[in-house]
Image: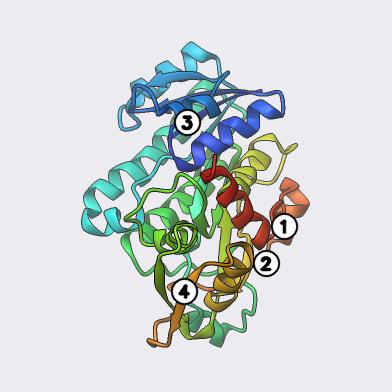
Amino acid sequence: MKVLITGGLGFIGTYAANRLLSLGHEAVTFDTLAGSSPEVAELLKGTEHFRGDLLNPMSLFEAVKKHKVDSIMHLAALRNLDSQRNPYLAFRLNCEGAINCYEAARVFGLERVVFASSSAAVAPKDFYDPLGFEELPDNPPLRPINVYGVTKAFDEMMGKEYSVVYGLSVVGVRLALIYGPGKKAGSKTSGWNDLIERSIQGEPMTQSRLSDLQVSINYAKDASEAAVCAVTAKNPPSATYNCTGHCVTSTQFCEAIRRVIPKANITLVDDGAKPATHGRFDTRRAKEHLGYSPVYSLEQGIEDHVKILSK
């Protein structure tokens, strides 16, 4: 199988490309960048690259045709805080970009489009409590509370319509908060990465207890594994699947860091903050239809994160 990965030189795209190669598949990275850092280039050794513009359908069509790909893995997106600052650009990149991928797959008769959705597409826990949801199913009422979440909800709903109208196989992987080596600073959730990376340096940090409510968290390699499972699965129903990782409190995450990095100096504070989205997701259908379940435990993810940064 040959897969075109939008955002292929990005955070999750590089892990996904590397994982596809390890399974004997081919990967084509599609990105506005001409190249990558030496570290990323080493990870992507064996892939093909197409420098293109996701907002230009002809650019995407050219890449699909030139490289004769079978499926598209759509991972390019404008991040959460950047989306909030620039809703118009968020619509263009996150919504128009997704539709361009759906169209390319329709026009060229590709096997499947897999796209990354987000727990930001759903609502905070308080919204679902009266509805009796302890764990959110794959198809809960969507009630995003920010621009990024709105764009991801759009992608989920439009993907469903492309499946209904054209019979296109469209599979979404709804990911949670993601941590791991290579995540850029300045995103809404990069503070969780900072807890690990600054602890390695022995720097003191403070972290909200988030009212001791649970959050779902993905290690980067597990997030990419979800996308790879979705693109390689045999005839899964078109849908968006909860592919969240581990459900933990802020306190539990920090305790896991201390076990891996004994010198970690993290102070937990009670500031009344709460998680932005629901913390518990039912992932049984992802395991059944996609064959996905997290490979890394919480501590294993932190250990791997530390190991990679120490190289």
**Which amino acid type corresponds to the residue marked 3 in the rendered image?**
Val
| Residue at mark 1 | 285
- Labelled pair 4, 1 in contact (Cβ < 8 Å): no
For the residues carrying marks 3 and 4, which lies nearer the camera in this image? Answer: 4
- Residue at image x 59%, y 63%? 139
Name the spot of residue 166 as percent of width and height, x first: 54, 36
* Residue 180 locus on image (x, y percent): 52, 51
| Mark with earlier residue (1, 3) | 3
- 174 and 80: which one is in front? 80
Q: Nearer the viewer, residue 175 or 34?
A: 34
Give the number of the mark in front: 2 or 3: 3
Q: Which residue is mark 3?
A: 40
For marks 4 and 2, give the CA distance: 31 Å
Picture residue at 46% right of the left edge, 72% below the top: 123
Q: Is residue 280 visible?
A: no
- The earlier-in-sequence mark between 2 and 3 is 3
Q: Amino acid at mark 1?
A: Arg
Seen in the picture, residue 76 relative to 61 is either above or below; the reply is below
Up the image or down, 208 lies above or below 72; here it is below
Residue 229 to residue 208: above or below: above
Mark 1 element type: helix
Which residue is drawn at the image coordinates 64% and 79% (left, top)?
A: 134
Q: Indicate left or right for 253 with 146 as reference.
A: right
Q: Which residue is labeled 2 in the image?
A: 282
Are the residues tagged 2 and 1 within 8 Å (C-beta)? yes
Q: Is residue 24 left or right of residue 136?
A: right
The reply to whether callout 2 and callout 3 are in contact (CB within 8 Å) is: no
Q: Is residue 227 visible?
A: yes
Cα gap from disc 2 to disc 1, whole angstroms? 8 Å
Give me the disc on residue 266: 4
